[in-house]
Structure formats: C-alpha cells, structure tokens
Amino acid sequence: MDFIRSLLSADESLLLEKTEAFCKGRLGELDRRAGEASTVDREILACLAGAGLLNWTVPGAYSPEARDVVRDFAPLRAPTEMSLVAFCLVRETLAKYCPNAELIFTMQGLGSGPISFSGSPEQKQKYLPQVARGERVAAFALTEPETGSDVAALALSARRDGDHYVLNGKKTLITMAPDADLYTVFAKTDPDAGSRGLTAFIVEKGMPGFDPGRRIELLAAHPIGEPVFTDCRVPVSHRIGEENSGFKVAMATLDFFRTTVGACAVGFAARALEESIAYAKKRRAFGKAISEFQAIQMKLGAMATELAAARALVYRAAFMRDRKIKPRISLESSQAKLFATEAAQRIIDEAVQIHGGAGVTKGVEVERLYREVRALRIYEGTSEIQHLIIAGQLLKD
C-alpha cells in the first residue's frame, strides 16, 4: 500500500486517513454490533451520511454538506466528477474493517450510478442529494431469473403508453432489495433489438404495480431480493437517457464500478492476510509458533505477493480513468476485477488453511471472509465474462 499512497493527492491521502480512523472508531462499533445482516442497517446508513462519506457516492455538485456535528470528513469535499481512485480507497478500507458499511456505501453509488452518469439535470438534482444524505437507499436492478451475463436477453418489458411506460416482469438477486427506496431498472423497450432495445428507468418504492418482492437468503447474509413489476406505470420523466440507450447506460456505470469490485476484493484479502499473520505468530505446534515453519512462511509470501499485484491492477485502472490517460478503461477495469477477485479467493482460502480447524469455525474472521468473497467472482460480470471482455479489447482493430 505504501507505493499506492505515494501516488495519491493530498486530498486522496486525507480521505484514506479519515476513512481508516472512521472504521476504527464509531463506524466500526456500529458495524460489529450489526453482525451479518440480511437487511439494510439504517443506523449505519445514517452514520455514513452524517459524517459526509456518502458524498463520495455522487458527483460533488450534488453532495450536500455533512450534517453530523463531528463532521468526520470535513473540510474535504467530494470532487465535481466522481473519482474512481477515491471510491476504491473508501471501498477497500470499508471492506477490510466494516463489511456492512462497505455494502451500503457501494450500493448508494452503484444504485444511483446511472443517474450520475446518464441522468438529466432534473433527475440528478432530485435524487442524488437524497442518496448522499442517506434519505433513500439505492439499488441497481439488471439481473433477471433467466438472464445473468446475457444482458441482451432481458425479459422485463417496458411498453410506452402516453406519458408513461408500463413495466411487466421480474428481477432477481438485486442487492438492497426489498429494502431499497430507489431502483434503477433496465427493461426491454424493443423486443427484437437485443441489447440495443434496452432502456433504463428510475422506479421508486410505492409506485403502483411495483412490488419489492421476496428476500433471498445467500451463503453470506446480504440484503438482496426479487422485485416484481405488474403493470407498473413509470412516468416518461423517469426514463434515464434516450429510449433504447439502456445498454450504454448500464455499461458506462459498470465500467466505473467493476474496478471497485477489485478494491473490495483487495480489502477482504488484506484483512485475511493480517489475520493470518497474527494467528501464525500466536498459534503453537510442535513446541514453536507455526510462523516459524517454512510451509506457513511460503503461504504468507505468496498471499502478500498476490495481494500487492491485485492492488496494483485496481489502482492502475482507477488512476488511468481519473487522470484521463484513456477515454475508456474497459480493458483495465476487467483485468482489475478478474485478477483481484480470483486472487482474493486464493488468499482467503490459504488464510483458512493456516487457521486450521479454527478457520472453519463460526465467529472467526476468516470463516466469514471465506463466505463473503465467493460472490465477487460472479457479480458485475463473472470471471469467465471478464476473460472474454479482455480478449475482445485485445482483438479490436
């Protein structure tokens, strides 16, 4: 991390420092008290918003002043354009120390991301300050029961009816559902146009015909559900971008957030390595600490090296985007997401092995991480899809 720190601006360094302190203080206390949760913890949401950290989930022009008297992140202000470096720094740190807060922070950004990147000025002004103030929980609704990575095969339909669209169908595995208040939803407006027939919409909880749906239980507890749309009438003013431009809206959003999945993986892996080093020093076998055994040292060496490589790929993509080195970072973001999530899986698996029987015991940190990390290789594009994206970028022209 020292090398990455050397590349940060003064504001980025201060943001990292304040986030670490926040995690080790009252945010960390709230997160530990919440434990593993399948519902959105509104107290953690309020803490993030009150301290001003949610300001980094939206463009700075729409981030309000921090309201909390402590003002943990004052005098810092979010940049005018969303910063991928800043988002990765915060997400990695929260993943390492405060997993509930990490999910809330991330989804406030991803759920409102289509509005931030592609929404109208009126949509941004209405919704983004509410997201930053924690008044509305945001969700990104793309996946359906019969479609995952095949976005072109979405079945949720949106039919124009005067000054409304009528939505019918179902989404699944939507993080923050059914608790979310604000959903960015992707639907098929031209059934025969494949990915070119998608349109994005803003759907608010309480709209007639919208059911936030059932809650889904996962390997690692998360708020996640299956929203249902039955003749749900959505005003035309809630359409994000032009009709049939939804695929571009989704990809622009995922281009940014895919890199941050790698940052989350780095945070998980860093915690696993930290826990493994501490455990290896105190656990004794055959008359000495297991850290003295060459087999354990080889594991730790490989884990640390993979972690450093993963972190380098994540921040390479983030710096290239923020410093405008390339107009698009599809290649770099996919490489970061692919390598970091796969490396984190290996690192955490080794952490469990180092812990032995303790590593598969409920309540031990690496056991939780083992369950948490698995989903990262699937969502926002599986590892297999990332290989195809990378190859596609290499074969262009």
Image (tube, grey):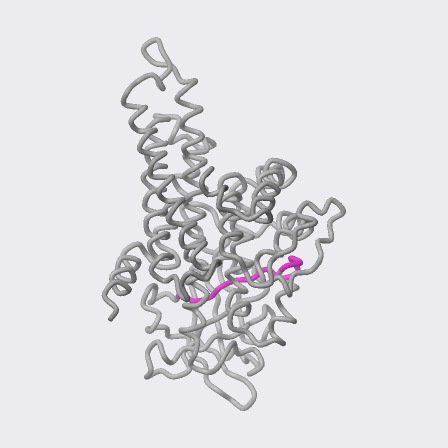
The one nearer the camera, 217 or 16, is 16
> What segment carries the magenta color?
132-143
Tell me the quarter of the image containing the C terminus.
bottom left
Q: Residue at x 45, y 72 (%)?
A: 249
Which residue is farthest right? 69
Instruction: Give the vertical position of 74 relative to 155 (above or below).
Output: above
Q: Is residue 374 left or right of residue 235?
A: left
Q: Residue at x 49, y 50 (%)?
A: 88
Give x and y (percent) for residue 198: 41, 77
> Depth check: 372 or 257 in front?
257
**Which percent across, then down, holds residue 154?**
37, 73
Quarter of the view holding residue 252: bottom left
Q: Is residue 357 above or below residue 285?
A: below
In the picture, measured across the screen, residue 344 lies left or right of residue 163, that is left
Percent coordinates x, y for residue 41 in the rendering: 60, 49
Q: Residue at x 46, y 43 (%)?
A: 4
The quarter of the picture where residue 367 lies is: top left
Residue 352, image quadrant: top left
Residue placed at 63% from the left, 76% from the top? Answer: 122
Specify the farthest residue to the top: 287
Relative horizontal placement of residue 23, taking residue 352 as reference (left or right): right
Extreme residue toward the bottom, this view: 162
Give the number of callouts. Answer: 0
Q: Nearer the viewer, residue 82 or 131?
A: 82
Question: x and y percent of residue 114 in the render?
Answer: 50, 69
Q: Is-magenta flag for residue 233?
A: no
Q: Is residue 13 above or below residue 142?
A: above
The answer to whether residue 135 is magenta is: yes
